[in-house]
Structures are given as C-alpha cells and as structure tokens.
C-alpha cells in the first residue's frame, strides 16, 4: 500500500469495482462474450483500502484469503477499479442499451453511508433503475429508509446459504465473520416493510451443501414473505477456501431453477413437491404434459434476479454447461436441460460431512 | 494505415493499432497462417498458425488453450484443431483446409497469455505443414489488399473509426 498521498488507494465512494462484462459493455475494455450474449446490467462493487471485513469461505474477497487489497477475482472474473464519475459519464449515452445498475456493498464500516452516496450520484445523472445489493451487517434501518427515499428500485440481500447452520459455518460465527443469519433475515423483513412486497430480492447459492428439500423450503418461506429469489450456482472461486470443491450437479441446479419458476408463477407450492430418500425433487405436482411445456419454453433456466440483469457466464466458464442462460434458450439447449433434469447424481459438497 | 519495417526484415501493416506482418494469410475466424521460411520438401512447406492481432486484442485476456486430439497429426478440413477461452468467450478453431500439425506450442498450456503478449512470435499456436493443394487454397484466405479491406470492415463492425494515421 503506497503511503504517498498521490498514490493513495482509490476507494469508495469515489471509486468502485466494475465487473468484466460491464467494463466491456461500457467500452472500458475490449472483450467478446460467447454466443454473442449482451450484458444489460452494470454490476459495481464498493472497494476499500482495508478490504472486506467478512470472511465468507466461498468468496474471493474473504478477509483471511484475499491477497492484498485488490479484488483479484470475484465470481470468476477480474473487477477493474474505476472512478464513479467515469462510469456515470459512460452510462449517460448508453441508457437505451443498458437496463439496470447494481451497486453492491462490501462488509465495511463506511459501506452503508457510501452506498447511499453512490446511488445518489447516479440518480443525479441517469434514469436507469438501480439495485442496491446490501450486507445487513453494516446497515441500519435508517439506511434502508434512505435508500428507499432516494429512489433505489430494488433492495437485495445476499443471504447466500439456504440454512442457518450453513450460514454460520460458511460466513458466520464459525469462520469469525461478522455476519449473523438473524440480522440478514431481519434485514429482509424490514426491507419488505419499507420497499414493499417483491421489491426486495435475495441471492441464494445452490450447492453450498444444502439438500434440494432445504433449498426449496427457504425459497418458499422467503417468497411468501414477499422476497424475490435470485438464484446462483456455487462456483469454486480460485483463491477462496472452497476453491477445490465441486459445483452442484446440473440435475440438482436445474430442478431448483424449475421450482423457482413454478413457485414465482404460483403454479406450485413447496408443500406439493415429492422428494426421494436423498431429498431430491422427484415430482413437481403438475401434470407431465404441462410441466414439459414449461420446460420446453426454456424460461425457468434463464438468469433470475432483477429485471434486466442477465450476468453472462458468471457461474461457469464458457466451455462448461451454462448454469443461468443469459439469453433465450435454443432448441439444443432445451434438449440438454431436459437430460440434465434427469441427473440425480449427488456430487460431494462442502459441509456434507460437517453439518 | 501505416506500413512499418520491424526490427527484422519483415514489413508490418498497422491499422488502428492492429498489426499484420507480411506475408500473412488470415481466415474469417482471424486464424493467421504465416510462412516459416523453412522448406523441408519443395512440395510441403511449413507455416506458423495462431490468432491475429485484431482478435487477440478484441477477446481480452486469454485464460485457457486446449489442443484437439493431441496424438493426431493429420487433420481434414473443418476438423477441430484447438480451442481458446477467455473469462467470457470461447471459440473452437477448425482446420481451414487439410493440414498436418508438426508442432504444438506447449508453452501456451501453462501460459496462454503469451498469445496476448506476442501473437506472431512466442504466442504462435501450431506449426503446420501444407501440401500443394492446401497451399493453393491459401490464396482464398484474406491476404495483402483483401486483408486490409476486410480488417477495415471488421474495425467498423466493432463501432470503431478507422484512423487515417
């Protein structure tokens, strides 16, 4: 860390990190995206000279694992550090091609105040919807109220883990991380009171050691609270504690995607599902012809989350099977997905031996 | 467009900062084929093959390279020869005509970014041998004036303006 004032670390709120795909979309760097996928959401992340205070085992920024203060990698890709002014300037003429901006907090004492400041600066110059991806650990109720007042479109909390034991094991007390499951859940409840039903979302990562039954149970509980589900597939982040662990099987992931779509469209309730002895979904409770029509639409397998956010190749390499389709599925994709749904292999996941 | 003499004997055409040594033959996938100037048999010439400067700049940092069928030497037209992958992009490169791979650049397996650093030098991907029939087909690839014209079109398709310098 240079001590020279002119070389001082460029940190939030004046600087943020930008995802590789967003940097390409704004013309900050050259790059091509496989199958001509377009990026519609500008994903940004706060940055601080002393890094994130949390220690989530699956994250490339975990306090005990990060190398230096630079965010080498997050969700598979590099995130260059760019001034907020430059991003706003690039966004102004691109408001027809870009559909959303998402500003994510780090776990840091200044993160709450700075999040409000960053979103305010966007609101002064652009009319695009803005999502706030928050860590409730560093957020007070007044912050949530302010975020609503300044016109934040969607309030999102990355709960990530499907159960309280997994949360504690991966990102809470067990790993000396400041996050607490209760605080996260409380944050989601407060946000639905302030922002309204289904103007709040949560990230859940499939494949952190939970069973399919555990995942759909929390999904239904959150959805019934008025929280939308943004689904991710665990990817072994290089440099993280879980770098050598496997992602969930495609069958596991596809069944959770399908359930989310059915639940969000009020076609199925979690209580109607049938499971096998491994707690895998074996019956969605719909006539097979109806279910086949839904699967053949490909819709359940497209990226879920805020409208306009498609995150191309965020959860898998381009050479691997696409987890969240950033575009409409083609016929060959639908054939693959149908085969994958029949995969009931259980891969080794973190925590299966531990919780 | 600039035509510059490099430190060696080679002429280099530079268009908007994208460089093309001469002579160079380029496929529509930006795979270049460059004579190695080593004739083993008058009928079978050796060539270096890799990604041209336009595509290596466009795709960003190359993270993975994998050779297809490493134990195979002879490849028919359109059979896969190698794949290139970045954080967000993947392409499977196919043989533009029948060819023999005489050498693979194994250094790229551990360090694929050599392609980004020096695509015509240390970042060459395969050394190939072409028989007379395949050599004749080189003329159907972009080269000389057709290469310049096509690169102009590619630059404009990316929304860039052609610099007159």
Image (tube, helix red, strand yellow):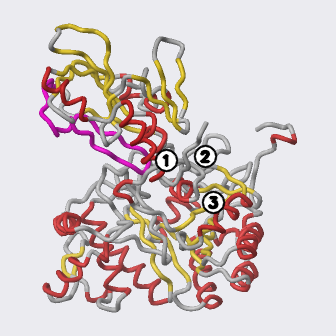
Q: CA distance from mark 1 to mark 3?
A: 21 Å
Residue A59 at least partly seen: no
Position in image of residue A55 (x %, y %):
59, 54
Q: CA distance from mark 2 to mark 3?
A: 19 Å
The residue where tag 1 is placed is A241
**Chain letter for the residue marked with disc 1 in the picture:** A
* Tags 1 and 2 on a common chain: yes
Q: CA distance from mark 1 to mark 2?
A: 9 Å
Q: Quadrant of residue A13?
A: bottom right
In-image side of B149 versus A292 (left or right): right
Q: Are marks 1 and 2 in contact (CB under 8 Å)?
A: yes
Can you say whether A83 is above or below B97 in the image?
below
Name the residue: 15% across, 13% down: B43
The residue where tag 3 is placed is A45
**Which mark is first along the chain, 2 or 1?**
2
Can you say whether A67 is above or below B121 in the image?
below
Q: Residues within 10 Å of mark 3 (few under 14, many from 20)?
A: many
**Which mark is first along the chain, 3 or 2?**
3
The residue where tag 2 is placed is A64
Q: Is B104 contained in the magenta span?
A: no
- Element marked by disc 2: loop
Tell me the magenta residue range.
B71-95
């Amino acid at each position: 860390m240079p001590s020279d004032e002119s070389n001082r670390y460029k940190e939030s709120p004046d600087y943020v990190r930008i995802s590789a795909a967003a940097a390409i979309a704004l013309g900050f760097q050259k790059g091509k995206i496989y199958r001509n996928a377009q990026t519609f959401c500008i994903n940004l992340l706060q940055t601080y000279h002393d890094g994130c205070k949390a220690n989530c085992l699956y994250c490339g920024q975990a306090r005990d694992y990060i190398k230096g203060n630079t965010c080498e990698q997050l969700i598979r890709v590099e995130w260059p550090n760019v001034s907020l002014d430059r991003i706003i300037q690039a966004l102004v003429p691109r408001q027809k091609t870009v559909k959303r901006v998402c500003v994510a907090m780090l776990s840091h004492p200044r993160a709450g105040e700075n999040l409000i400041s960053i979103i305010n600066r966007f609101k002064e110059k652009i009319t695009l919807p803005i999502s706030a991806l928050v860590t409730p650990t560093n957020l007070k109720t007044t912050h949530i109220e302010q975020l609503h007042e300044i016109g934040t479109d969607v309030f999102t909390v990355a709960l990530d883990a499907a159960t309280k034991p997994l949360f504690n094991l991966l990102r809470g007390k067990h790993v000396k991380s400041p996050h607490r499951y209760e605080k996260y859940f409380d944050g989601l409840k407060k946000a639905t009171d302030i922002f309204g039903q289904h103007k709040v979302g949560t990230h859940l990562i499939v494949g952190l050691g939970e069973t399919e039954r555990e995942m759909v149970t929390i999904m239904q509980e959150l959805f019934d609270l008025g929280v939308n589900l943004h689904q991710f597939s665990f990817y072994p982040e290089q440099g993280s504690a879980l770098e050598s662990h496997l992602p969930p099987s495609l069958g596991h992931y596809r069944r959770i995607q399908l359930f989310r779509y059915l639940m969000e469209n009020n076609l199925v309730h979690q209580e109607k599902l049938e499971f096998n002895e491994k707690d895998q979904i074996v019956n969605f409770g719909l006539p097979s012809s109806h279910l086949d029509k839904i699967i053949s639409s490909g819709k359940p397998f497209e990226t879920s989350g805020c409208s306009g956010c498609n995150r191309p190749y965020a959860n898998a390499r381009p050479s691997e099977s696409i987890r969240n389709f950033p575009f409409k599925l083609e016929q060959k994709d639908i054939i693959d997905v149908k085969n994958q749904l029949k995969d009931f292999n259980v891969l080794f996941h973190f925590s299966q031996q531990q919780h | 467009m600039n035509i510059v003499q490099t430190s060696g004997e080679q002429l280099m055409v530079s268009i908007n900062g994208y460089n093309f040594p001469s002579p160079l033959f380029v496929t529509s996938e930006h795979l270049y084929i460059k004579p190695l100037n080593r004739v083993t048999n008058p009928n079978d010439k050796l060539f270096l093959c890799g990604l041209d400067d336009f595509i290596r700049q466009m795709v960003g940092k190359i993270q993975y390279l994998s050779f297809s069928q490493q134990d195979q030497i002879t490849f028919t037209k359109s059979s896969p020869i190698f794949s290139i992958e970045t954080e967000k992009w993947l392409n499977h490169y196919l043989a533009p005509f029948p060819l023999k791979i005489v050498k693979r650049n194994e250094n790229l397996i551990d360090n694929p970014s050599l392609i980004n650093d020096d695509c015509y030098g240390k970042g060459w991907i395969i050394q190939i041998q072409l028989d007379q029939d395949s050599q004749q087909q080189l003329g159907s690839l972009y080269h000389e004036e057709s290469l310049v014209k096509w690169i102009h079109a590619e630059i404009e398709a990316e929304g860039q303006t052609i610099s007159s310098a």
